[in-house]
Amino acid sequence: MFVFQLLFVSLFLRQVMSSGSGRHSLWAPATYISGSTPFPEFSVVLMLDDIQVGYYDSVMDRLTSGGGEEGAELGLGQEAVFVLRLTLVKHRFNLTAGVHVQQRLTGCEVLQDGQPALIMFRDGSNGQDADSLMYNMTHFSYAGGDGWEIQWDAMKKTYFQMLYSNIYLPFCVRTLRHLLDREKRLVTRRVQPRVRFITKQVVGGAQLTCMATDFYPCHINLTLLRDGQSVDEDQLTGGAVLPNANGLYQVRKTLTVTDEELQQKHNYTCAAAHLSLDNRLEVSWRAESSCSHRMHIISAPASLTAAAAVLLLLLWSRRKHTRRSEGVAMDTQVQTGEEYVPVPPTEDTSREETGNRNVTSVSRL
């Protein structure tokens, strides 16, 4: 089930990404699920370009985010059609009980330069293309998927051509222009990308990642250069533009660089061209000026332990030096024959001198 949803979302993203500047679109991806799953049985998301402006599912049974009554009709009236088509699919391919998915991408595009508007639908069953229809006011085309036995005669083709040209296309374009007026600030905004290098050490070299993030709209040209020359795309991994959780986008391209290449000290440049920039934004990286792929960072506990060891060593050295100084002083006193004789108090000295004088006087007598 989740794989089917990813396939459908990737189809929608490719359709949105294919539109260039000056083009706006209104899409209503719808999904019907047969079988026991934790997901709603039927759901529709209303997208103005790449901005969600409405949502409906069979559990809430109401439209949220204000797509308007006209926007709701793009998908809400299709649930019965989805049930019928999935029933035909099961019968056609002898599908047994279990989880089965019927999906449809329907919507329209308008261009600001007066080119014909486009309306289309594309159906999928269990993650595989079923059939599709495209009409741009001058050309009408219908295609059936592999294994589908759907035949359109001339009368049926004329009927659908009139239906799309007189009802569906004017209705979709009118809704699109209404939502564009309401969401003009979001649709026409320009957010500059942040460009940077990310390096990671790997066995035998390093991974050098050129990354641009937090930009809008999603169209961007990201290039990785070595000494001013573009690196071949077959040497890079990544490159898909992905949505961020904040409504902006990111893209990254990664190059694996060997140790020999790092020693050659090439200059790598990450360059981004975007609608929000007057000039190309560039960030450079060179192995000699960034050793992040060779840097070994000492953890905080190890740093504290090393500092304590150095402090203890200094204290021990100082104490040893003090003891050695005291020992040298004692040795000097012994070598000079000096002996410390305590000096008696002044009072005792006077008494001794008096007694001696008395003794002398007696002997003379």
Image: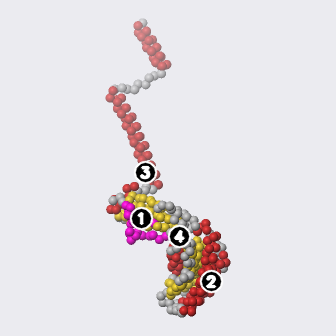
State the image quarter where residue 263 is shown: bottom left
Asked if the residue at tag 3 contacts the one at tag 4, i.e. Cβ–Cβ closer than 8 Å, the answer is no
Tell me the number on the disc at residue 21.
Answer: 4
**Secondary structure beneath disc 3?**
helix
> How much space separates mark 2 and mark 4, taking CA atoms?
27 Å
Location of residue 294 with respect to 320 vertically, above or below:
below
Tell me: 162 left or right of 344. Answer: right
**Secondary structure beneath disc 4?**
loop
Instruction: Give the residue pinned by disc 1.
Output: 224
Instruction: Identify the amino acid type marked 3.
Output: Ala
> How much space separates mark 3 and mark 1, taking CA atoms?
42 Å
Instruction: Give the residue pinned by disc 3.
Output: 306
Residue 213: within the magenta? no
Q: Residues within 10 Å of mark 3 (few under 14, many from 20)?
A: few
> How much space separates mark 1 and mark 4, taking CA atoms?
24 Å
The residue lying at 45 percent from left, 11 percent from top is: 358
- Image coordinates of residue 94 in percent, x first then y, are 52, 92
Residue range in magenta is: 222-244
Tell me the number on the disc at residue 167.
Answer: 2
